[in-house]
Image (cartoon, helix red, strand yellow):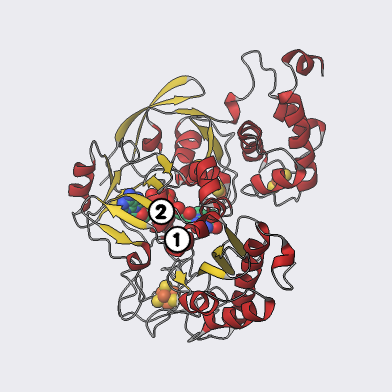
Amino acid sequence: MRDFSYLRAASTEEASQAAREAGAMLLAGGTTLLDLAKCGVAEPDTVIDITHLSGLGGIAVDANGAMIGALAKMGEVADDPLIKAAFPAVAESLSLAASQQLRNMATIGGNLLQRTRCTYFRDPAVFPACNKRNPGSGCSAMGGVTRNHAVLGTSEACIASNPGDLALALVAFDAVIETGSRKVAADDFFLLPGHTPEKETVLQPGEIITGISIPASAAAKNSTYLKVRDRQSYEFAAASAAVGLEFEMDGKTVRDIRVALGGVATKPWRARAVEKALIGKVLDLVAIEKATKLAMEGAVSHGDNHYKIDLAPRVIARAIMKVATSNVAPSNVGGLA
Amino acid sequence: MTRTIHLSLDINGERRELDVEPRVTLLDALRDHLALTGTKKGCDQGQCGACTCHVDDKRVLSCLTLAAQVEGRQVTTIEGLADENGVLHAVQSAFIEHDAFQCGYCTPGQIMSAVACIREGHAGSDAEIREYMSGNLCRCGAYNNIVVAVREAAKAVSAPARMVEVA
Ligand SMILES: Cc1cc2nc3c(=O)[nH]c(=O)nc-3n(C[C@H](O)[C@H](O)[C@H](O)COP(=O)(O)OP(=O)(O)OC[C@H]3O[C@@H](n4cnc5c(N)ncnc54)[C@H](O)[C@@H]3O)c2cc1C
Ligand code: SF4
Ligand code: FES
Ligand code: FES
């Protein structure tokens, strides 16, 4: 790890001012920044520690929704009883991520800005070509081992998948990311790689995430996060889904459904085509199977990651069945029990 | 150019002063500057759990924590677990009794993680122990005995204090 100077920010304004300087980087939990500094991917001249700032933490939940401070720890949010009750998919996406040690360190703000686990991106000494690290240098993943790379939202420049879990739950339930100066819908916060894979979010230099708000909804309350991976725990998703469901009074017709996909796309992926196909429909296995396939429209495989095209719709289907049978008599849902 | 900063840290209840480069992690500060080598370095990248310590009673990875970040916080390492008379913590005793290690390299991290796991209330069943101890890898594969040790230690810790002394 290259040497850097360390600044413990006394206020958000000071941190924001200092972070505008070239070579300056904010440090929250440090679990992405220090990891990447050790890999030689991040080379900060100045590290600005924001963990001692007050006013950026805390979790508040009321009938309208939740407000989560940027410095709240992943573990705190995962274990919060009010979050678990009103937003189970949010709590589960966090408790199924990383390990308890990392969840005790990592913050919600930092979590949204974690970088891809593309092994080529993480190894600059061996693989100098990476458009995300070094724009215009090429992409070492193309033609390489692509088992963990994205099939949705890719570009000629980059096929790296976004590895985060929480972000899916946020895009599914229309969360809003707040900075000192503006509020951005979670779905608009993340960018597709296009020709500029180095730019992953709309955040500007020095702009600090202050918190996240999530509006309450019946679908968010009846939601789940399903994560399928190579080992049972402490692993990133091969494919994952955040799903929420609200039935009409009849208990079988879909009034509202939210579907977001992870482990398969270059950004947290809201599967609106699946939602559209199911709203107003009576939920049964045939309808679910047909609708979930729509999530893969436009998917491009690169060989090793082809399995994701089959896997992802099944993960969504399983998650839908789980929320469909969790709060209604199974007999109401044709063939799902 | 070497820039050093002065840090005053609270480690196992003792005030320790040191001058280090800002990039020095808590793990390297403990091992290389404070001669506390009980905390182990495995991957040095947040992937194995060997470096697990407690900061303000929460388990964290010292390899991804800057020493500078823990100024003003309480750090506990494996050396700080036994009481002042050298009586081992219930989790340490359980690891010995249930043979929960082979080479022992992952053990300090496993024990620090287990102490916190029990305190968090995440040791309610074997399945829960496995899930909440998944951040600690063991290359010797002592997992089965580790689960037994954590389960038994959890019982001992939740038992009334006098029973622990008798046991
Ligand atoms: C072994 C391992 C396994 C993991 N497994 C998973 C997993 O299964 N699922 C998952 O989702 N994640 C996983 N992670 C990633 C982990 O969740 C992230 O590293 C973590 O959430 C980042 O948060 P942090 O507070 O530590 O960020 P930091 O490392 O402190 O910061 C990350 C980036 O965000 C910037 N930043 C931080 N806070 C702010 C803010 N408030 N405003 C503006 N910029 C900010 C920093 O400058 C930096 O560039 C894993 C990580 C490791 C090391
Ligand atoms: S997929 Fe993206 S991150 Fe990975 S090597 Fe190619 S350009 Fe870099
Ligand atoms: S040495 Fe810290 S997690 Fe491996
Ligand atoms: S006992 Fe050898 S690594 Fe766990």
Horizontal and vertical percent position of residue A259: 51, 69
Instruction: Work out how far the residue at label 1 is from the one at label 2, CA to CA, in angstroms.
Output: 7 Å
Q: Which mark is residue A173?
A: 1
Q: Chain of mark 1?
A: A
Q: Amino acid at mark 2?
A: Ile
The residue drawn where x is 22% and y is 54% is A206
Q: Which mark is residue A13?
A: none
Horizontal and vertical percent position of residue A196: 30, 76
State left or right for residue B123 relative to residue A175: right
State left or right for residue A287 relative to residue A26: right
Q: Amino acid at mark 1?
A: Phe
Horizontal and vertical percent position of residue B160: 74, 17
State left or right for residue A268 relative to residue A254: left
Up-down: is A247 above or below B2?
A: below
Up-down: is B42 above or below B6?
A: below
Closest to the observer: A318 or A47? A318
- Secondary structure type for disc 1: loop
Badge 1 vs badge 2, beta-carbon distance below 8 Å: yes
* Quadrant of residue B15 within the rendered picture: top left
The verdict on a common chain for dots 1 and 2 is yes
Can the viewer see residue B29 in this picture? yes
Local crowd size for mark 2, using a 10 Å CA cut-off: few (<14), some (14–19), many (≥20): many
Can the viewer see residue A2 in this picture? no
Closest to the observer: B151 or A132? B151
* Quadrant of residue A268 within the rendered picture: bottom left
Q: Is mark 2 within 8 Å of ligand 1?
A: no
Q: How many marks?
A: 2
Q: Which mark is residue A214?
A: 2
Q: Chain of mark 2?
A: A
Q: Quadrant of the C terminus of chain B?
A: top right
The residue drawn where x is 37% and y is 82% is A157
Horizontal and vertical percent position of residue B10: 44, 24
